[in-house]
Amino acid sequence: MTRAARLACSLALLALAGCARDAARPVPPPASVASPPGEGVPRDEPRAKYGNPPFYEVGGRRYVVLTSAVGYTEQGIASWYGPDFHGGRTATGETYDMDAMTGAHPTLPLPTWVRVTNLENGRSVVVRLNDRGPFARGRIIDLSRAAAERLDMIRSGTARVEVVSLAGAARVAGAPAAAATYYAQAGAFGSRENAEALASRLRDAGIAGVAVAESISGGRPIYRVRAGPVATLPEFDALIERLRVAGAADARLAL
């Protein structure tokens, strides 16, 4: 199965086509970062429209997307992906180019620029994260073929690395990140009447924050019944359970 197919199956709620990690510790980002020849210039970019849900699940594991990449650093095993995925879509919707200096990460916001250092030989490279993965336990980053070549890890396939975020140029160091909030979608209907009927049943069940939101999909109106927000994942899981007990069997994360 291709990378895009795996992501499409496992992350269907993300509407994408498209590892255990060490805990982050607050390390201030460098004031300025020079890029070796052939690399892009690290910069803060707006969060991509796709690839940045509050959380997602793959293989029965939940990955919580960080609200900020500022001060992030970790050490672990890097892998790389190449010809089998070349030309496919990344989690952000961009085209994967194995000859570009890019990478994939399970939880950092996309895009994020990071410096990756091969701890086995001291080589380092700057890459732009625009994809999700790897999802194998113990691996913390997936690199493009070009980046892997620079780190001299093509033959071995993996290497122990340090990943340091280069985010923060457009933020005051130490500024708090925005708090995460989670909404649940109880159902989606082509009829407002059906949506309002479900919303009414949920309110009668004592569920707070129930509302009907209208959007357009394929030129037709869609009425989505949402509940929330809640501030933590345990609260979200409890809300999903209450919605299902109240009759919303397909309740899930609202994007």
Image: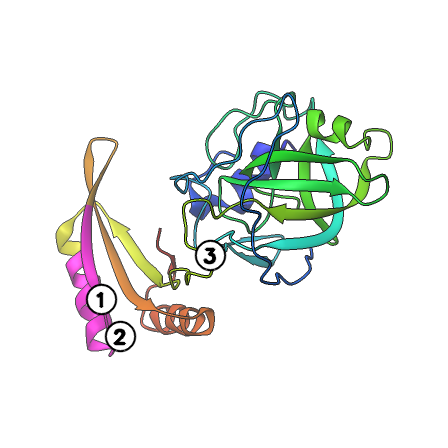
Q: x, y (%) of residue 194?
A: 18, 55
Q: x, y (%) of residue 121?
A: 85, 39
Q: Is residue 49 left or right of residue 224?
A: right
Q: Which residue is mark 3?
A: 173
Q: At 42% across and 38% down in the image, what residue appears?
A: 45
Q: At 64% across and 54% down in the image, what residue appears?
A: 73
Is 92 placed above or below 189 here? above
Q: Are marks 1 and 2 in contact (CB under 8 Å)?
A: yes
Pick whichever of labels 2 and 3 is earlier in the sequence: 3
Could you say which is closer to the camera, residue 87 or residue 122?
Answer: 122
Give the spatial CA distance, label 2 vs label 3: 39 Å
Residue type, numbered disc 2? Ile
Q: Which residue is mark 2?
A: 207
Q: On the image, which quarter does residue 72 sit in?
A: bottom right
Q: Residue lying furthest bottom in this view?
A: 206
Give the spatial CA distance, label 1 vs label 2: 7 Å
Q: Which residue is mark 1?
A: 210
Q: Is residue 209 magenta?
A: yes
Q: x, y (%) of residue 149?
A: 77, 26
Tell me, yes or no, if residue 233 can be seen here. yes
Q: Which residues are magenta?
A: 195-214
Is 42 placed above or below 188 here? above
Q: On the image, which quarter does residue 38 sit in?
A: top right
Give the spatial CA distance, label 1 vs label 3: 38 Å
Could you say which is closer to the camera, residue 93 or residue 217?
Answer: 93
